[in-house]
Amino acid sequence: MTLFADVFETFGNAALALDPASGERLRALEGRSIQIESTAPPQVLSLIVRDACINVIAEPTDAPNVIVRGRTQDLLAWFADPRQASQTKQRVAIEGDETTLVEIMDVFKRVAPGALPFQDLLGAAEIAIASIRSAVEGATSAVQQSVASHYVDENRANAFLDGMDDLRLRVDRLTARVNAAEQAGK
């Protein structure tokens, strides 16, 4: 989970740094935090706003403003496409100050599109997804061979990997749309 936390923090803050307005919005959220808890497999990821950046750590924080809890696949679906939140809402629990959650997610949504080099970001996203998939495959294999294999069975691991494949497909489609929009704009 540390690899994912590092990739998310680096990628997210690099994107936010390209949009000066994001820094101002984050300064207004200084000290607020979101704790994301996966119930299957059990993992915790915390996002903390500090110095106009998002710090991501793979451990719980003291008194987070909001806790988002659910299975990993439901959390990924919910974060990847909040428009379908009604479909995943019953599987994703939100406890605490939902305003903080909305405000922090809004910072990412409002990054000025003209400020982002989409090809670079999408390429980085593809690399991150491939890295995470590789790490998950390796971890799944190691866990299945150990005493802790009862926590992750083959069906759950395959379902998670299928979700990662779906996410990669979405990134590929987004890349194609960006390319088409860039070509139309020339």
Image (cartoon, grey):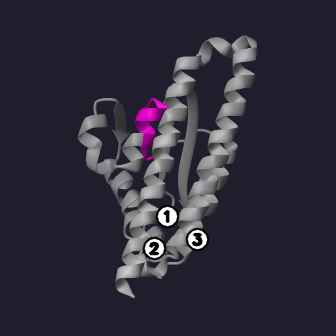
User: Where residue 22 is drawn, which disc sits there?
Assistant: 2
Q: Is residue 161 left or right of residue 148?
A: left
Whether the residues at callouts 2 and 3 have beta carbons within 8 Å, the answer is no
Viewer-side label of 1, 3 = 3
- Amino acid carrying label 3: it is Asp
Specify the quadrant that holds the N terminus. top right
- Report which residue position mark 3 lands on: 120
User: Where residue 30 is drawn, which disc sits there?
Assistant: 1
User: In the rendered view, would you say 13 is above or below 84?
Assistant: below
Q: Camera-side residue: 26 or 88?
A: 88
State the extent of the magenta-drawn residues as a range. Answer: 64-76
Whether the residues at callouts 1 and 3 have beta carbons within 8 Å, the answer is no
| For marks 2 and 1 on the same chain, the one whose residue lies earlier in the sequence | 2
Whether the residues at callouts 2 and 1 have beta carbons within 8 Å, the answer is no
Residue 68 in the magenta stretch? The answer is yes
Q: How packed is label 1: few (under 14 Cα within 10 Å), some, or many (20 or more)?
A: some
Please tell me in which quadrant of the rendered image residue 53 appears.
bottom right
Q: Camera-side residue: 59 or 182?
A: 182
Q: Please name the residue shown 58% across and 32% down the image.
A: 43
